[in-house]
Image (cartoon, rainbow, N blue to C red):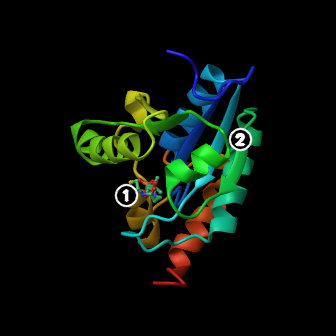
Protein backbone atom coordinates (compact mmCIF):
# COMPACT_ATOMS: atom_id res chain seq x y z
CA UNK A 1 0.00 0.00 0.00
CA UNK A 2 1.34 3.40 -0.91
CA UNK A 3 1.29 6.36 1.41
CA UNK A 4 -1.80 8.54 0.95
CA UNK A 5 0.34 11.62 0.68
CA UNK A 6 3.56 11.50 -1.26
CA UNK A 7 5.83 13.18 1.25
CA UNK A 8 9.35 12.53 2.44
CA UNK A 9 8.35 13.17 6.05
CA UNK A 10 5.65 11.03 7.68
CA UNK A 11 3.30 13.10 9.78
CA UNK A 12 0.65 12.08 12.28
CA UNK A 13 -2.26 14.01 13.74
CA UNK A 14 -3.17 13.57 17.40
CA UNK A 15 -6.61 15.15 17.90
CA UNK A 16 -8.45 15.60 21.17
CA UNK A 17 -10.19 17.94 23.55
CA UNK A 18 -7.18 18.17 25.92
CA UNK A 19 -9.37 19.83 28.54
CA UNK A 20 -6.89 19.93 30.29
CA UNK A 21 -3.75 18.17 29.03
CA UNK A 22 -3.05 15.14 31.25
CA UNK A 23 -0.04 12.91 31.81
CA UNK A 24 -1.83 10.29 29.69
CA UNK A 25 -1.95 12.77 26.78
CA UNK A 26 1.69 13.61 27.35
CA UNK A 27 2.64 9.93 27.15
CA UNK A 28 0.93 9.62 23.75
CA UNK A 29 2.59 12.85 22.60
CA UNK A 30 6.08 11.64 23.59
CA UNK A 31 5.57 8.25 21.94
CA UNK A 32 3.92 9.71 18.85
CA UNK A 33 6.69 12.25 18.38
CA UNK A 34 9.25 9.43 18.52
CA UNK A 35 7.34 7.33 15.97
CA UNK A 36 6.70 10.01 13.36
CA UNK A 37 8.79 12.68 11.66
CA UNK A 38 6.25 15.29 12.65
CA UNK A 39 3.41 15.24 15.16
CA UNK A 40 0.58 17.73 14.85
CA UNK A 41 -1.50 17.92 18.03
CA UNK A 42 -4.92 19.33 17.23
CA UNK A 43 -7.37 20.78 19.74
CA UNK A 44 -10.89 20.10 18.53
CA UNK A 45 -14.38 20.70 19.75
CA UNK A 46 -16.24 17.71 21.13
CA UNK A 47 -19.90 18.57 20.60
CA UNK A 48 -20.94 16.46 23.61
CA UNK A 49 -18.60 18.18 26.09
CA UNK A 50 -18.70 21.62 27.73
CA UNK A 51 -15.08 22.81 27.76
CA UNK A 52 -13.45 24.19 30.92
CA UNK A 53 -10.39 25.64 29.25
CA UNK A 54 -10.43 27.89 26.19
CA UNK A 55 -8.85 26.58 23.00
CA UNK A 56 -6.07 29.16 23.47
CA UNK A 57 -5.40 27.93 27.02
CA UNK A 58 -5.24 24.32 25.81
CA UNK A 59 -2.84 25.23 23.01
CA UNK A 60 -0.65 27.02 25.56
CA UNK A 61 -0.73 23.95 27.81
CA UNK A 62 0.26 21.66 24.92
CA UNK A 63 3.14 23.91 23.89
CA UNK A 64 4.38 24.23 27.47
CA UNK A 65 4.32 20.48 28.18
CA UNK A 66 6.04 19.72 24.87
CA UNK A 67 8.84 22.19 25.64
CA UNK A 68 9.23 20.79 29.19
CA UNK A 69 9.39 17.24 27.80
CA UNK A 70 11.80 18.31 24.99
CA UNK A 71 9.39 17.08 22.33
CA UNK A 72 8.85 18.87 19.06
CA UNK A 73 5.17 19.18 18.13
CA UNK A 74 2.93 21.56 16.24
CA UNK A 75 -0.12 22.50 18.31
CA UNK A 76 -3.09 23.80 16.35
CA UNK A 77 -6.83 24.25 16.74
CA UNK A 78 -9.33 22.74 14.32
CA UNK A 79 -13.05 22.97 13.79
CA UNK A 80 -15.36 20.93 11.61
CA UNK A 81 -14.68 17.38 10.51
CA UNK A 82 -11.43 15.88 11.73
CA UNK A 83 -10.73 13.98 8.51
CA UNK A 84 -11.26 17.12 6.43
CA UNK A 85 -8.72 18.89 8.61
CA UNK A 86 -6.31 15.94 8.25
CA UNK A 87 -6.75 16.02 4.47
CA UNK A 88 -6.14 19.76 4.34
CA UNK A 89 -2.93 19.18 6.32
CA UNK A 90 -2.04 16.23 4.04
CA UNK A 91 -1.80 13.89 7.02
CA UNK A 92 -2.62 10.20 6.55
CA UNK A 93 -2.50 8.96 10.13
CA UNK A 94 -4.62 9.81 13.17
CA UNK A 95 -3.25 8.94 16.58
CA UNK A 96 -5.37 8.20 19.66
CA UNK A 97 -4.64 6.79 23.09
CA UNK A 98 -6.54 3.74 24.37
CA UNK A 99 -6.38 2.92 28.08
CA UNK A 100 -8.77 -0.02 28.12
CA UNK A 101 -11.93 -1.65 26.82
CA UNK A 102 -14.12 1.33 27.62
CA UNK A 103 -11.91 3.63 25.56
CA UNK A 104 -12.01 1.14 22.71
CA UNK A 105 -15.83 1.15 22.76
CA UNK A 106 -15.69 4.94 22.35
CA UNK A 107 -12.82 4.97 19.87
CA UNK A 108 -13.82 2.21 17.44
CA UNK A 109 -17.02 3.82 16.12
CA UNK A 110 -15.13 7.12 15.67
CA UNK A 111 -12.31 5.35 13.84
CA UNK A 112 -14.78 3.44 11.65
CA UNK A 113 -16.71 6.60 10.82
CA UNK A 114 -13.50 8.45 10.02
CA UNK A 115 -12.42 5.55 7.82
CA UNK A 116 -15.75 5.60 5.98
CA UNK A 117 -15.42 9.35 5.43
CA UNK A 118 -11.76 9.15 4.44
CA UNK A 119 -10.59 5.61 3.54
CA UNK A 120 -7.07 6.82 2.84
CA UNK A 121 -6.59 7.96 6.47
CA UNK A 122 -5.71 5.41 9.15
CA UNK A 123 -6.26 5.56 12.90
CA UNK A 124 -3.45 4.25 15.05
CA UNK A 125 -4.00 3.51 18.75
CA UNK A 126 -1.26 3.89 21.33
CA UNK A 127 -1.49 2.39 24.81
CA UNK A 128 -0.28 4.67 27.60
CA UNK A 129 1.88 3.34 30.43
CA UNK A 130 -0.09 1.59 33.22
CA UNK A 131 0.62 4.45 35.68
CA UNK A 132 -1.59 6.67 33.53
CA UNK A 133 -4.29 4.07 32.78
CA UNK A 134 -6.68 5.69 35.27
CA UNK A 135 -5.94 9.29 34.27
CA UNK A 136 -8.62 11.05 32.24
CA UNK A 137 -9.30 14.73 31.69
CA UNK A 138 -12.78 14.13 33.12
CA UNK A 139 -11.42 12.74 36.42
CA UNK A 140 -8.80 15.49 36.58
CA UNK A 141 -11.50 18.15 36.20
CA UNK A 142 -13.68 16.47 38.81
CA UNK A 143 -10.89 16.08 41.38
CA UNK A 144 -9.48 19.53 40.63
CA UNK A 145 -12.72 21.45 41.04
CA UNK A 146 -13.04 19.95 44.51
CA UNK A 147 -9.58 21.20 45.40
CA UNK A 148 -7.53 18.02 44.94
CA UNK A 149 -3.82 18.31 44.22
CA UNK A 150 -3.18 17.09 40.69
CA UNK A 151 0.43 15.96 41.13
CA UNK A 152 1.10 12.95 38.88
CA UNK A 153 -2.12 13.52 36.94
CA UNK A 154 -1.20 16.55 34.84
CA UNK A 155 2.28 17.58 33.71
CA UNK A 156 4.11 19.42 36.50
CA UNK A 157 4.77 22.55 34.41
CA UNK A 158 1.03 23.28 34.06
CA UNK A 159 -0.17 21.81 37.39
CA UNK A 160 -0.47 25.01 39.42
CA UNK A 161 -2.32 26.87 36.65
CA UNK A 162 -4.69 23.96 36.04
CA UNK A 163 -5.37 23.50 39.77
CA UNK A 164 -6.15 27.18 40.21
CA UNK A 165 -8.44 27.37 37.20
CA UNK A 166 -10.36 24.25 38.26
CA UNK A 167 -10.78 25.55 41.83
CA UNK A 168 -12.20 28.82 40.46
CA UNK A 169 -14.94 26.88 38.63
CA UNK A 170 -15.95 26.75 35.00
CA UNK A 171 -16.49 30.27 33.64
CA UNK A 172 -18.51 28.78 30.79
CA UNK A 173 -20.34 26.18 32.88
O1 LIG B 1 -10.53 14.10 23.56
P1 LIG B 1 -11.86 13.78 22.92
O2 LIG B 1 -12.97 14.66 23.49
O3 LIG B 1 -12.20 12.33 23.00
O4 LIG B 1 -11.69 14.20 21.37
C1 LIG B 1 -12.75 13.99 20.47
C2 LIG B 1 -12.50 14.67 19.12
C3 LIG B 1 -12.38 16.18 19.28
C4 LIG B 1 -11.22 14.11 18.50
C5 LIG B 1 -13.74 14.30 18.22
O5 LIG B 1 -14.91 14.70 18.87
C6 LIG B 1 -13.66 14.91 16.83
O6 LIG B 1 -12.93 14.41 15.99
N1 LIG B 1 -14.44 15.98 16.58
C7 LIG B 1 -14.47 16.64 15.29
C8 LIG B 1 -15.78 16.33 14.55
C9 LIG B 1 -15.68 15.04 13.77
O7 LIG B 1 -14.84 14.86 12.90
N2 LIG B 1 -16.59 14.10 14.07
C10 LIG B 1 -16.66 12.84 13.38
C11 LIG B 1 -15.68 11.82 13.89
S1 LIG B 1 -16.04 11.31 15.52
Query: In the image, ligand 1 is in what quadrant?
Result: bottom left
For image coordinates 40% across by 51% down, the residue present is 136
Q: Nearer the viewer, residue 11 or 39?
A: 11
Q: Which mark is residue 80?
A: none
Q: Secondary structure at mark 2?
A: helix
Q: Quadrant of the C terminus?
A: bottom left
For image coordinates 66% across by 39% down, the residue present is 90
- Residue 150: in sight, yes or no? no
Q: Nearer the viewer, mark 1 or mark 2?
A: 2
Q: Is residue 90 above or below residue 171?
A: above
Query: CB under 8 Å between callouts 1 and 2?
Result: no
Q: How many marks?
A: 2
Q: Residues within 10 Å of mark 2 (few under 14, many from 20)?
A: many
For image coordinates 27% across by 36% down, the residue present is 100
Q: Nearer the viewer, residue 60 or 106?
A: 106
Q: Which residue is label 1 attached to? A: 139
Residue 30 % position (x, y): 61, 30
Q: Is residue 47 above or below residue 78?
A: below
Of the residues under marks 1 and 2, which one precedes in the sequence?
A: 2
Q: Which residue is label 2 attached to? A: 66
Q: Residue furthest top?
A: 1
Name the side, left or right, on which 100 lies relative to 42: left
Residue 137 % position (x, y): 44, 56
Residues under labels 1 and 2: Cα distance? Answer: 22 Å
- Residue 15: in sight, yes or no? yes
Q: Is residue 60 above or below residue 167?
A: above
Name the side, left or right, on which 122 lies relative to 2: left
Q: Quadrant of residue 112?
A: top left
Residue 121 % position (x, y): 49, 35
For image coordinates 57% across by 64% down, the residue present is 79
Amino acid sequence: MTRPYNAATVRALYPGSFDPVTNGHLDVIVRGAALFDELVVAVGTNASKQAWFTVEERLEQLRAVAVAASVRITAVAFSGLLVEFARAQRIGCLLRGVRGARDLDYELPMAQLNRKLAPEIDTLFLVPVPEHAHVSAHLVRDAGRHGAELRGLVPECIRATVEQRLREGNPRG
